[in-house]
Image (cartoon, grey):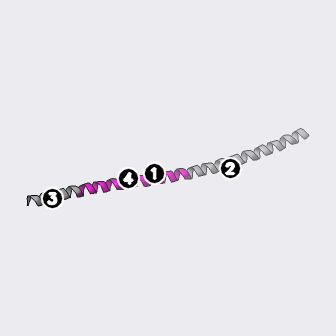
Amino acid sequence: MSDYDNLVKDYHFMQSELDKVAENRDEWIQYSEKQNDMINDLENELTAKDELIEVLRQELLIRRQNDVTRTKMAVLN
């Protein structure tokens, strides 16, 4: 009977350890998901900023072209 009791005791200990591992795994999964969400948010923000920079560059180019055109028109007049 003692061997059986030891086996039951060992079984319960191992089950407890497995439960702890599962809990840690679940916590890690939640942490990873939060990190992935944060990375995605940052990537989206960077993409939006890149798009804004491109729009501003295009606007600057147009303004420069307008300045050149105005200068040419002033010279012609």
Which residue is under mark 1?
Answer: 43
Say what secondary structure mark 2 lies in.
helix
Instruction: Give the label, 3 or 1, closer to the camera.
Output: 3
Instruction: Give the label, 2 or 1, closer to the camera.
Output: 1
Three-letter code, disc 3: Thr
Could you tell me what secondary structure mostly forms the magenta stretch?
helix
Q: Quadrant of the C terminus?
A: bottom left
Three-letter code, disc 2: Glu
Instruction: Inspect the magenta stretch and tell me whether residue 58 lies in it.
Output: yes
- Residue lying at 72% horizontally and 47% vertically, measured from the top left: 19
Stretch in magenta: 35-63
Q: Earlier in the sequence, mark 2 or mark 1?
A: 2
Q: Earlier in the sequence, mark 3 or mark 1?
A: 1
Q: CA distance from mark 4 to mark 1?
A: 10 Å
Three-letter code, disc 4: Asp
Q: Quadrant of the N terminus?
A: top right
Q: Earlier in the sequence, mark 4 or mark 2?
A: 2
Q: Is 18 left or right of 64, judged from the image as shown?
A: right
Which residue is under mark 2?
Answer: 23
**Residue 42: image location, x then y, percent:** 47, 53
Q: CA distance from mark 4 to mark 2?
A: 40 Å
Three-letter code, disc 1: Glu
Q: Residues within 10 Å of mark 2 (few under 14, many from 20)?
A: few
The mark found on residue 50 in the picture is: 4
Q: Is 10 left or right of 65, judged from the image as shown?
A: right
Q: Residue furthest right?
A: 1
